[in-house]
Image (cartoon, helix red, strand yellow):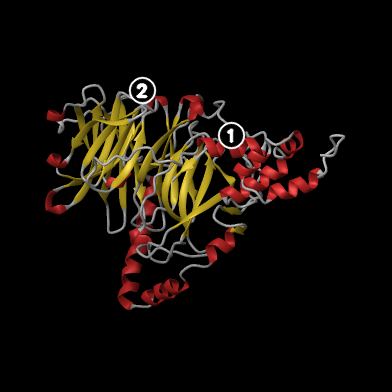
Amino acid sequence: MDEGGTPLLPDCLVYQIFLSLGPADVLAAGLVCRQWQAVSRDELLWREQFYRYYQVAREVPRHPAATSWYEEFQRLYDTVPCVEVQTLREHTDQVLHLSFSHSGYRLASCSKDCTVKIWSNHLTISLLHSADMRPYNWSYTQFSQFNQDDSLLLASGVFLGPHNSSSGEIVVISLDKYELLSRVRNKPYDVFGCWLTETSLISGNLHRMGDITSCSVLWLNNAFQNVESENVNVVKRLFKIQNLNASTIRTVMVADCGRFDSPDLLLDISAPPGCVFDLGSDGIEEDEEAAAGPAAGRVEEGVRRLLDTRAQLQLAEHRLETKAAELLARSRTKPPERSAACTQNKLLIFTTGCLTYSPHQIGIKRILPHQMTMAGPVLGEGRGSDAFFDALDHVIDVHGHIIGMGLSPDNRYLYVNSRAWPRGSVVADPMQPPPIAEEIDLLVFDLKTMRKVKRALRAHRAYTPNDECFFIFLDVSRDFVAR
């Protein structure tokens, strides 16, 4: 400054100098004088710092709740876990899933070592209990979920049945005395299972009806069955849904409609439709560009397979079976029930399909209050002969292979990991789904309106084909999505 206290450097030059500094240096320089302090809090400066430091595409908007770029930078810097504070080595094989209790004071882990471990999550994480599932003929544990009051833990895994046939099984563990309260068969094993109420859980079963036709039965199970009487389960059949073209119901979860209008922050949906925000680059891509490119050679290979005579004969049989199944379902499907008290309902959400075994659709079935209890017909005695199957309330087609789903804390938004099919692709053979993209898109759907939120995120890539495509669990908080 000159003798009169007037800055010798104008603000614009100080701003240009600060642009070349990192965040820590900008904050340190702001301590020099009042002028530098004011420039160091400039909104445009911290906008540049934000996109440069976090390497986010500039088209990705700021969090709707943020009041300034400086505060948003500070929030991410201070609250995103980035320092490893502890390493847990008690598992002896690959860890497949982690779940946290609603209070946050406990967590559970599942692993290929066939154990379910329950941990205390305080300042230092410590092991509370380890349940070895190998005595029950399990191959590995794969998923767990705490009930709403954190008194019970649901854990599911792969069960080795007779003749090495793999199915699934769900167990319920009390978090008081760590006792095994019940065991429930679960088929296929990637239904995973989920809680419907504090003391009841949903499992699945699969019945083959043809070469590529089956039906999935979803069961409501009491959590307090005695292990010794597992062959006399306390169960109630919820829904029976027809599967076409080798598809099955997988990945069930429940959304509570009564929480849709909670004060939790709603998503900003101001982005233009059809855009994919690529978090690992500096620009955006249109959906058409994202889906058009991969694996043209595989498409040609699929066409050559269809020209084979044996493949043509098998395909004709599949089409005949699918047509017969569709005709059967038209006359023997029970229409959805309606209820005026919508806020008391819950939504059963699962992956399914209608064209191929690859899960490419999200099925949604409303669960009414009278269906959430164990009272009523146990094995569907109230179902007439003309109402063999249950119709879905809503179906969302993502035109790609679904590899993960998760709910927002208010249960209103469904987050979906998907690897897209090429635009315009047609499934000619249910056993030969279209090739999937390497990019993993994160799609968001509003369960209140059943519409897609007008933006998608992309950050990860995967290189496995359809038959080796692995499920990626999602965890969603108010501010972050982890996958």
Q: Residue at x 67, y 48 (%)?
A: 48
Q: Is residue 267 visible?
A: no
Q: Earlier in the sequence, mark 1 or mark 2?
A: 2
Q: Name, please, the residue furthest toward the front.
A: 3
Q: Nearer the viewer, residue 8 or 469?
A: 8
Place of residue 6 in the rendered image (x, y in percent of width and height, measured from the top left): 85, 37
Q: Which of 14 and 99 is in front in this view?
A: 14
Residue denoted by label 1: 266
Which numbered dot is residue 25? none
Disc 1 marks which amino acid? Leu
Q: Which residue is drawn at 57% across and 52% down?
A: 55
Place of residue 290 in the rendered image (x, y in percent of width and height, measured from the top left): 55, 61
Place of residue 354 in the rendered image (x, y in percent of width and height, measured from the top left): 41, 54
Q: Which of 373 and 403 is in front in this view?
A: 403
Left or right side of 229 for 36: right
Count of labels shown?
Answer: 2
Q: Name, please, the residue furthest toward the right.
A: 4
- Neighbor class of circle 2 (other Cα within 10 Å; few <14, some 14-19, many 20+) is few
Which numbered dot is residue 149? 2
Up/down of 403 relative to 423, above or below: above
Disc 2 marks which amino acid? Asp
Marks 1 and 2, Cα distance to the nearest angstrom?
25 Å
Q: Is mark 2 on a helix, strand or loop?
A: loop
